[in-house]
Image (spheres, rainbow, N blue to C red):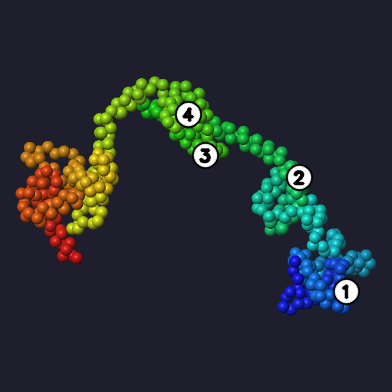
Amino acid sequence: MSCDSTRKDPGIGYSTFIKAVKEFKEIGITVTKFLDETKHDIENVLLENKASWHKSCRDDYNSTKLERAKKKRKQADVEEEEKGCDADGSETAQSSPVKSRRSLTPFDPKILQCFFCEKNDLASNLRLASTLELDKKVRECAILLNDSKLIAKLSTGDLIAVEAKYHAACLVKLYNRARPLKKQCSDATDSSSVDLEELAFAELIGYIEECLEREAPGVLTLSELVKFYQCKLKEVGAESGKTNATRLRERVLEAVPDLTAHPEDREVILASRHDIGGILTEAKRTDSDAWCLARAAHIVRKDILKVDNSFNGKFSPECQKNSVPASLLSLVGMLIKDPSNNQACVSVSQLIVFNSVARPRHRPEATGSTHHIRSRECPLPIYTALKIRGATRDRALIDAFYNLGLKISYDRFLTVSTEITNSVIDM
């Protein structure tokens, strides 16, 4: 409740309210019967009794509503004059053709019209459209019912923009009328979806038969088939929800009797009956220790041969770890039961990379030392040669460690010394 007597200038609000009440009464609208306008001190009475009102009730009779009511009343008076002139026949020849107009009743902000049935009712009995989802559903129903009158109303704007009011029963009635038509459309869509699913399944069966013919032995996983089936459903435009893997497996086994399903943990392996023996033999062969060692060596060697190191005259903080592949560090760490970031693990890994070659060289004059590639020179062999040379000044000792594969050669040492000297001069 708001009270005008608590303001710094009490009485202004009461006088404005009394003035508005008189103007509303002049156009035929009664605001309240409590005020007796014959009293001259009505403003003092309101002030002494600290009259209060709801803000929402006061807003129903503010200056904006008053101007609207005056405008409507003025239009009604003009129409009445036009009708009077037509009845007297004084301006029959000069006036335009008679147009039918709806009769205007005195303006009452509490009386509103339903958007659907167009009947007047109290605002408390009507609901206000407040979501775009409602507007979307109403438009869909209007199109299904081909209701030209409702479509014409909706063409003026969405329900929120036009501040549409409606009876809940009218909206439910509209939904009930459109429900049978919507069900018919849904049934037609479902029937077409079934055909599209059959088309996608036929492509899946063709893919399985192609894999069995091309690969020997042919082995498929159920997860792979589910992904392929979902992809084909999207391509043909079918509604692709979550595919039931178990039902798809049963359909595949029924369509391709030659396949057998074998559960493996959380996966299902599908293989041809005729290839089971070959698959088991291959699995036994590849399960041997020698096969595992050869496979691990192949993986690590592939990473080693990709190493590309270069020495620019100085050692960076992380140069040792960056000079060897991560797979080699992990393997050495597992072999010596030590973390891969340990210095011993890093040192052994560097020596392995330093002594690795793409292919062996068989020469009669070879002394037994490995031919080292500069791109696989790691910091450890270079640092060791520099350290020994600085401490002993003995070339024979450097050559001995070189033959053991622990350091670079003496000739390479001289080149590195020159590079270090040039880098110091450049600084």
Q: Which amino acid does label 1 sit on?
A: Glu
- Disc 3 or 4, which lies upstream in sequence? 4
Write the residue at 12% across / 57% down: 417
Asked which secondary structure carries label 3, the reply is: helix
Pinpoint residue 234: horizontal percent, then vertical percent: 52, 39
Identify which residue, 32 or 105, lies in the foreground: 32
Asked which secondary structure carries label 2, the reply is: helix
Q: What residue type is labelled 4?
A: Ile
Q: Which amino acid does label 2 sit on?
A: Lys
- Please identify, in this view, whether the residue under mark 4 or under mark 2 is nearer the observer: 2
- Disc 1 or 3, which lies upstream in sequence? 1
Write the residue at 41% across / 24% down: 272
| Residue under label 3 | 234
Asked which secondary structure carries label 1, the reply is: loop
| Residue under label 4 | 205
Task: For label 1, count other residues whose C-alpha is less than 10 Å away and answer few (under 14), some (14-19) or many (20+).
Answer: few
Looking at the rendering, which quadrant does residue 293 occupy? Answer: top left
Task: Using the image, determine if residue 335 lies above or below residue 414.
Answer: above
- Disc 3 or 2, which lies upstream in sequence? 2
Task: Using the image, determine if residue 75 lies above or below residue 373.
Answer: below
Pinpoint residue 268: horizontal percent, then vertical percent: 44, 29
Asked which secondary structure carries label 4, the reply is: helix
* Label at residue 37: 1
